[in-house]
Image (cartoon, helix red, strand yellow):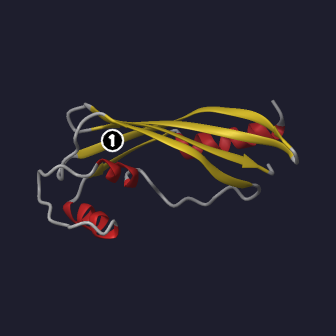
Amino acid sequence: MTEALRELREQMEARYNVTRTEPVELGRVRDYLLAMDEPAEIGFGDVVPPLFMLTLARTRRPQPSKGTAVKAGDEYEFRAPVRVGDTITVTQRLADIQVKEGKNGPMYLVIAEGTFRNQRGEIVCMQRVKSFRWGQ
């Protein structure tokens, strides 16, 4: 393993190997619906749109100090409805880093996976996110 790959793995493990718990708050769901130009007529206990799950477990983190990254595709599997008032625990992990050869040197395909569980422990969503990074 090269030093660049070792450094990238450490950065990505610190970023992705985490668990976060968040409530599905009515105000946050209303803000999401308004941002999507949808009617915000929703109340406690109502089912939230599945894509609201993309807003959970997100933090604004500083990006690595060197190199560049682009999204390479995200996949979500929505398994059960989520309601306003639920509490969702998101467990993410670094699944893999694959080295690809680019015309300007190595590129790294970073793959992370996430599991979203409600307060009853039921899996409500599965996530697989990919990004390409280079210039490490």
Type of the residue with mark 1: Thr
Dot 1 crowding, Cα within 10 Å, few <14, some 14–19, many 20+: many
Residue 87 placement, left or right of 89 = left
Q: Quadrant of residue 34?
A: bottom left
* Residue name at image x 62 percent, y 43 percent: 12
Residue 33 at x, y = what percent? 27, 64
Secondary structure under tag 1 reads strand
Residue lying farthest to the right in this orientation: 104
Residue 100 placement, left or right of 19 = right
Nearer the observer, 29 or 63:
29
Q: Quadrant of residue 122?
A: top left
Residue 61 at x, y = what percent? 56, 59
* Residue name at image x 61 percent, y 60 percent: 62
Q: Is residue 100 above or below residue 39?
A: above
Residue 1 placement, left or right of 95 = right
Q: Is residue 6 above or below residue 35?
A: above
Q: Quadrant of residue 64?
A: bottom right
* Residue name at image x 68 percent, y 53 percent: 69
Q: Is residue 2 above or below residue 43?
A: above
Residue 115 placement, left or right of 4 = left
Count of number-bearing discs: 1
Q: Which residue is mark 1?
A: 89
Residue 1 at x, y = what percent? 81, 29
Residue 135 at x, y = what percent? 81, 51
* Residue name at image x 60 percent, y 39 percent: 13
